Image (spheres, coloured by chain):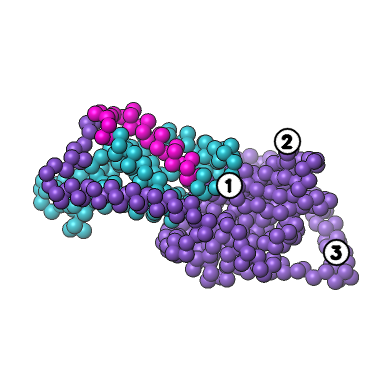
Amino acid sequence: MLRPAQYRPGQSRKAQYRLFAAYVVAIVGAVTGLLLAILSVADPVGFAAMRSVAQETVAPAARLTRSITGSVSGIDDSVAAYFAAGSQNQRLRAQVAEQQRQLVAASTLAEENRQMRILLKLAEQGSDAVANGYLLTSNPTSSRRLAILSIGRNAGVRAGMPVRAADGLIGRVLDAGPTTARILLLTDSDNIVPLRRASDGLPALASGSGNGELDVRTLNLASNPFRPGDILVTSGTGGVYRPNIPVAIVVRKHRDGAVARPLADPAKVDIVSVLPAYAASAAESEVRP
Amino acid sequence: MSGLAPTRIGEPPSRLRLTIVPVGSVMIASALPAILPTIAAWAWLPPLGLALFLAWRLLHPTLWPVWIGLPLGLWDDLLSGQPVGSAAGLWTLTLLAIDFIDQRTYWRGYWQDWMIAAIAMSAIMLVGARLAHPTAPASQLIRLVDLQIVVTILAYPFMVRVAAWLDSIRLLRR
């Protein structure tokens, strides 16, 4: 393709000025944009409002696609269930019998547990969720792991609140719009979560490694005590996440830490709960996303 | 509707349609990933808005003024979760660079276009990742976008086809 004639405005003063102005606007705009992006450590309030508007604009479409694929994947599962139905039936029967035995054992344990709790006067501290919603979408083109939650300020969601699913921690609310909220997922490389090992309370820090797994490091650099299968829970340090929310399971060790898989997979969870911020001041002292 | 469809045989398409098809398609391509009902564990989808934007620009050098990257990039920023201003700035710088290349070269074809787009998109994604994660070490940064860059470069010819197909709609006469 030959070089276009666009950049030869000829004798027309008007065309010359227009071309010049376009270049001035473009260069000034590009530099301003990059400066804004670099300075977005302090996210300008005006852009937060604009982003909120854009997010709310596409949210209805996201809700629609979410509802459609929900039912489609359901059909998918029920078709798949017809294959190997016979052997599955036998296996499930055996499983039900086994689980009934376990259930009886568990119910006695639960009763015992309840009585011991009364004895210890252990209140279930703040297990009540602010609101429940579902994850609409997460942009698969961005290197940041942000998900959009189906509820926002209308349901009492505020920035800094932790979000969890039944299996474990999902992340925390980055900012809340009128009817949607942005969530910084556990797997984002900027989301650092203070943890401890469930078995012995060994403190550790986790951050996303960018491929859906977590990098776990101990605070004590001299040793690497992780073993595959270790369960990690939140420690409550830092005040954002309350203690004892399950977070991840260690998959393998590496030289200076371990790789862990989140217990709650954001792609598979249905309902998530937004919890109140652990310490009231945590939302205000929020660090950069 | 009368503004979009020609009313007489052989009439050229309206100016509105000529403008709105490229701009609208890039905006939709930017918004599409934000509508997909998936919770991605890592960045695997090519930045559709960016790819279509470059496809339009390389297909039609005279289509857009050089500042068009600012509004389209801003729209992409608002939906992608990148720091606001990064795509606006990077897309515009890319347009300026392509303008520069156009003034220096006498001829470019399909393979040159693909190469220009590949270099531009890789650079934009790497710098964009750096802007989103200012403190991450370089190795981790590359790990965040390496797969995506490969997928994007391979997907670019498809985006050119999409742009060309949209262009045929754009220029459709009765």
Camera-near label (1 vs 2) is: 1
Q: Residues within 10 Å of mark 3 (few under 14, many from 20)?
A: few
Give the chain letter for purple. A
The answer to whether residue B54 of the structure is visible from this angle is: no
Against B61, residue B69 (above or below) is below
Residue A228: x and y in percent read: 76, 40
Main SS of residues in magenta: helix
Q: Which residues are magenta?
A: B102-129
Q: Residues within 10 Å of mark 1 (few under 14, many from 20)?
A: few
Q: What chain is tagged by disc 1?
A: B
Residue bearing the label numbered 2:
A255
Q: Secondary structure at mark 3?
A: helix
Residue A86: x and y in percent read: 66, 41
Residue bearing the label numbered 3:
A113
Q: What chain is tagged by disc 2?
A: A
> Looking at numbered disc 1 in the image, what kind of residue is underneath it?
Thr
Q: What chain is tagged by disc 3?
A: A
Chain B palette colour: cyan
> Looking at numbered disc 2 in the image, what kind of residue is underneath it?
Arg
Q: Is residue B1 magenta?
A: no
Residue toward you, B95 or B29: B95
Q: Horizontally, is A132 left or right of A245 in the view?
A: left
Q: Horizontally, is A168 left or right of A68 in the view?
A: right
